Image: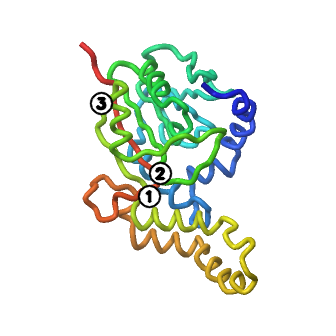
């Protein structure tokens, strides 16, 4: 269920998800962008599953559908709170027909669902038998209401909730990992008003260091050169792979006898 106050705020959030800057940052991220590391790595993870085959697919919680161009031949349909092919109700249901889609794409939606089980049940309902779910959500990430924010996931936790809700999980990738995750979190923290109310001399001494660490184009470029293997990690044995910003699962509907 979506609370009435949160429901009233939805149009504002949906409009934000569809503005040009928001969409550009996701499909063409630049090293100077605030969320470059997390969005560039997420794009790489999703692009690895891109397809030019003909299929019927649903972007479930689509916003502005930033990844539509990665599936150029798909009959690309959307579900969201207004302005989409299918409307999502306050209960998390849609008016999409049963067993229709070859692929359901879900990017950064599950953490905003009060009932992840209900969301996954709906995804399973609209997928064809054996249909595929490609789902990303947050690992370590700051709280951000849109209009609500409920959950964070480990790789094993995401695998578990998918398996408990009728999916066979083929792979779970960690995205923005180790040193890339650490710097993403550091830059996010330094962007907060940490020095407000601190003594003047301390602010005078520390602010130049903050500005240096927030030179995003330089640091993001350096991390791209030094740690490309930490963009998307498939092997959890890689050092520091237990720290990650996003997690992406590739799953199919479990076949029943």
Q: How crowded is mark 1: few (under 14 residues within 10 Å), some or many (20 or more)?
A: many
Nearer the viewer's eye, disc 1 or disc 2?
Answer: 1
In the image, which disc is placed on residue 42? 2
Residue ID at (72%, 85%): 204
Earlier residue among tags 1 and 3? 3
> What distance separates the C-alpha of mark 1 from that of mark 3?
24 Å
Q: Work out whether 170 lies above or below 28.
A: above
Earlier residue among tags 3 and 2? 2
Element type where label 3 sits in the image: strand
Residue 35: quadrant of the picture:
bottom right
Element type where label 2 sits in the image: helix
Whole-percent x, y for residue 100 in the image: 45, 17
Q: In which quadrant of the rendered image does the C terminus lie? A: top left
Q: Closer to the camera, 50 or 204?
A: 204
Whole-percent x, y for residue 195 in the image: 69, 73
> What distance separates the C-alpha of mark 3 from that of mark 2?
22 Å
Q: Do the residues labelled 1 and 2 touch (CB within 8 Å)?
A: yes
Q: In which quadrant of the rendered image does the N terminus lie? A: top right
Q: Name the residue under label 1.
A: 176
Earlier residue among tags 1 and 2? 2
Q: Is residue 244 left or right of residue 205?
A: left
Whole-percent x, y for residue 10 in the image: 71, 34
């Amino acid at each position: 269920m979506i609370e009435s106050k949160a429901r009233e705020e939805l149009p504002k959030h949906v409009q934000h998800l569809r503005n040009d800057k928001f969409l550009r940052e996701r499909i063409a991220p630049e090293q100077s962008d605030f969320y470059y590391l997390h969005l560039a790595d997420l794009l790489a993870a999703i692009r690895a599953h891109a397809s030019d085959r003909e299929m019927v697919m649903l972007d479930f919680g689509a916003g502005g559908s930033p990844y539509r161009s990665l599936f150029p031949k798909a009959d690309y349909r959307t579900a969201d709170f207004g302005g989409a092919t299918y409307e999502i109700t306050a209960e998390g249901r849609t008016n999409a027909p049963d067993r229709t889609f070859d692929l359901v794409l879900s990017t950064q939606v599950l953490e905003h669902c009060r009932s992840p089980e209900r969301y996954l049940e709906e995804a399973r309902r609209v997928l064809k038998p054996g249909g595929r779910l490609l789902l990303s959500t947050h690992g370590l990430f700051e709280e951000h209401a849109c209009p609500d924010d409920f959950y964070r996931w480990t790789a094993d936790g995401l695998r578990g909730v998918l398996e408990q809700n009728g999916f066979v999980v083929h792979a779970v990738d960690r995205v923005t990992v180790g040193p890339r995750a650490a710097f993403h979190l550091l830059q996010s923290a330094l962007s907060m008003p940490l020095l407000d109310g601190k003594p003047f001399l301390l602010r005078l001494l520390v602010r130049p260091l903050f500005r240096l660490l927030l030179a995003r184009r330089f640091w993001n470029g350096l991390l791209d050169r030094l740690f490309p293997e930490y963009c998307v990690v498939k092997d959890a044995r890689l050092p520091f792979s237990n720290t990650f910003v996003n997690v992406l699962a590739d799953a199919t509907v479990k076949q029943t006898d």
